[in-house]
Amino acid sequence: MPTPKASLRDTFGSGLDRDDSANVSRIIGRHGSARGILSPSGSTLGRSCGRSPSEVERPMDGTYERTKSVTFEDDLPHGFPERKASFSRFHFEEDDALAPLSGFVAVVLSVVFVAAESSRPQSHSSTRREITFVRHGQSTWNAVGRIQGSSNFSFLTDKGESQAEITRGIVAEEEYDACLASPLRRARQTADVVWGRRDASAIREDRDLREIDMYAFEGLFKDEGKAKFGDAYDTWKKSPHELVIEGHHPVRELWDRATSVWERSLSGSGGEQKILVVAHNAMNQALIGSALGLGPNYFRRLLQSNCAVSKVVLDENFAPNTGKGIVLEYLNQTPEVPLGQDDSVTLIHCPSSVEDEAVITTSVINMLRMIPVRTLMHTKDGSSTRLAGEIIERCKKESSGECPFAAIAVESIDESTKVLAETAGFSGSTFIVADKSFCQNFIAQTLVMESGEMFNLSPGGITVFDMNGGPKKDPVAVCINHRLYLPAFRRDFNIA
């Protein structure tokens, strides 16, 4: 095989409503005080996500605001390990003579909360919705390896602007009802470029779309972290969802904020059915992860490259953190396939038609020229066997009659996993040619999900996993159902 070409990492980047609280305060004010935890300004009533009593979020101006509210610990989003069965914590502190009123107040509070819940915008609508996510282009702090967090000092580099222009071509034919953008400069610059000639008044900034709040870590060069923060920085690298900085849990707060965005801004209650969201690496991970029903422990396992495009389709059953009512069309789609290195697995959804096989075979061969290949596996159905055979024959022609990698037929995911284990000591990536069901189930098993039916894979679609790339050497989804390597899609998306 010829020397591999430059990879994607070289060319495209690596990768409530206050009314509820007011109602409660008015009732409590007459009969005593209710002791609750301090919740962040603007957070959804009853969703503390296990935060400590001193925990607050930081407004854009850098100041802090504390709002006392009554919080239900059993109302944590589905999937959080600290989910508890306890109820609200009311404590009446005034004169004992008021104690008999506590039962009355509890009844009134129950009525208030039920009314508040019924009046709050719901997290689903009765119609189909399409949400497209774009991460901002390369920023000045990306380029020098500096932790940005939700700081607002960096802006797009020339490369970042070029990436945004390419992404504008990818989404050029889409008709969006609105664009929601992070107010941080690097994201808003990207949104303005990607939105193109559409009506600029349809771009709305949403403060909750800002990047993860990293507090004391913000501004650090990545090689300074260990020296300045020791064990805390180790936790950030190896178990980020467990990190605590200055009393804050950044990743858990991020997931809570993503849930709020789904419920408040992406609920479909305003009649907007197709929305473009332009935000950040961690923020997009949290939005997509929470939509798929994945918790904060999946942070850094859903890759978001600079200016990459991801898309989900929602129906009336959708609710964040449940995995219901959602289909993922594609994840981390970039102009070049983000091929992995050693220990990566690339799934190829085999087409059912012979006509498609010819185009896909040529495109796959072009990919194989870019990366060392360890093994080609295929399932034993006719289409997969035929496509794998075509790939082997083409490789033989380009390698003087000898294919430089092995071809192995497998019948099940367990069998493919066994082959992966047996070839773990060899260099190169593994390719698996299989039907849609096999690919869906492989994705689900790799991400430890109950079902892979929510992944809408297209014929020829490429899914790449870095099998040891996560914080705990767990698999990272580098891309899912990537199609831009196919000539037809490159033409459709105005990519040369």
Image (tube, helix red, strand yellow):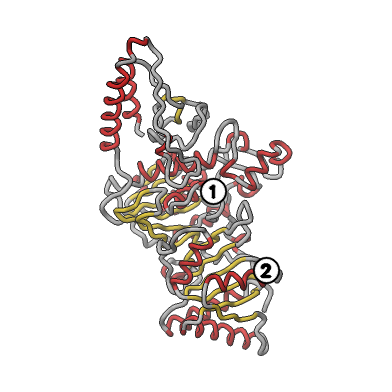
Say whether residue 386 is visible.
Answer: yes
Task: Estimate how packed mark 2 is, as few (under 14), some (14 to 19) or many (20 or more) residues with alpha carbons within 10 Å.
Answer: some
Residue at horizontal 41 percent and vertical 37 percent from the top: 74
Left or right: 258 in relation to 217: left
Q: What is the quadrant of the N terminus in the image?
A: bottom right
Give the percent coordinates (x, y) of residue 220. Answer: 66, 39
- Provide the secondary structure element on which disc 1 rests: helix
Give the percent coordinates (x, y) of residue 188. Answer: 46, 45
Please determine whether, in this image, residue 355 is positioned above or below residue 267: below
Q: Quadrant of residue 102?
A: top left
Q: Nearer the viewer, residue 448 or 14?
A: 448
Q: Of the residues under marks 2 and 1, which one precedes in the sequence?
A: 1
Q: Which mark is residue 438?
A: none
Residue type, mark 2 in image: Ala
Q: Which mark is residue 424?
A: 2
Left or right: 230 in relation to 359: right
Q: Nearer the viewer, residue 130 or 496?
A: 130
Q: Nearer the viewer, residue 401 or 300?
A: 300
Please determine whether, in this image, residue 477 is positioned above or below residue 224: below
Q: Nearer the viewer, residue 41 or 134?
A: 41
Task: Estimate how packed mark 1 is, as few (under 14), some (14 to 19) or many (20 or more) residues with alpha carbons within 10 Å.
Answer: some
